[in-house]
Amino acid sequence: MIRVLLVDDQILMRQGLRKLLEIEDGIEVAGEAADGREALRQVPACRPDVALVDARMPGMDGVELITRLTAEHPEVAAIVLSTFDEDEYIFGALRAGARGYLLKDCSPQELVDAIGKAHRGEVVLDTPVAARLVADVRRGRPAPGGDRLSAREQEVARLVAAGASNREIAARLFITEGTVKNHVSSILRKLGLRDRTRLALHLSAHHLSSHHGD
């Protein structure tokens, strides 16, 4: 059972999401909050697995809330559910640690699927959002041949894309955190990427390309 916390300042939106999710097998609405501060207060009591977070809220907005959740409750997978597909919200949320970014006109099934994927540690992006991010990644892509990773770097890159921390990667691969940091720095340099978020998106883009031939 995936426990979901709904965070949105519009009560009609929260009620609609609750009705939508309550009929789904395997999903339980664990709580609701009208803003980021209320959400942080509720997390210890309602113990959500996934938080659906509105990008724009009074007081503490979605990006600030996700930053706090990532630092204080890393076990909660945050998905932004927004009417805005502006770069500052998309990149801000993903840099803060969001597992996904969906627009509010997505279908109910897309939302349910996204909750399951985020809970499993996958990155979930709405199609228009993914297209924008892939374009951004490709603009920074090096010339062909410049991104050949060693076998160990490929292992590290896959774990970064799955959302693993340096400590988790070190434990999984039986190497030190310092060695993981060196590998990540090398991977980012070879791929011409600025940070771990863009690395995850770069790999997601290649994964999508290999499956859909675009």
Image: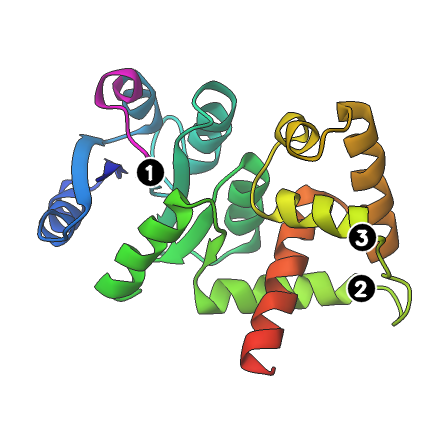
Residue neighbourhood size for the residue with mark 2, other residues' Cα within 10 Å, grouped as few (<14), some (14–19), many (≥20): some
Question: Which numbered disc covers residue 50?
Answer: 1
| Residue 45 falls within the magenta-colored stretch | yes
| N-term mark: 2 or 1 | 1
Badge 1 marks a residue whose secondary structure is: strand
The stretch of residues the image draws in magenta is 42-51
On the image, which quarter does residue 124 sit in? bottom left
User: Is there a contact, CB below 8 Å, between mark 2 and mark 1?
Assistant: no
Q: Earlier in the sequence, mark 3 or mark 2?
A: 2
In the picture of the structure, the residue carrying the numbered disc 3 is 151
Residue 161 is left or right of residue 66, and the answer is right
How many numbered marks does the figure carry? 3
Residue that badge 2 annotates? 141
Residue at 65% across, 27% down: 171
Taking the view exactly as shown, the residue that stands out farthest to the front is 174
Q: Amino acid at mark 2?
A: Arg
Pick the residue in front: 104 or 146: 146
The image shows residue 71 at horizontal and vertical percentages of: 52, 22
**Does 86 appear above or below 43?**
below
> Marks 3 and 1: in contact by CB < 8 Å?
no
Q: Viewer-nearest of labels 3 and 2?
A: 3
Nearer mark to the viewer, of 2 and 1: 1
Query: What is the secondary structure assignment of the residue under circle 3?
Result: helix
* Sequence-first tag of 1 and 3: 1
Looking at the rendered structure, the kind of residue marked 1 is Val
98 lies left or right of 5: right
- Real-space CA distance between mark 2 and mark 1, rounded to the nearest whole angstrom: 32 Å
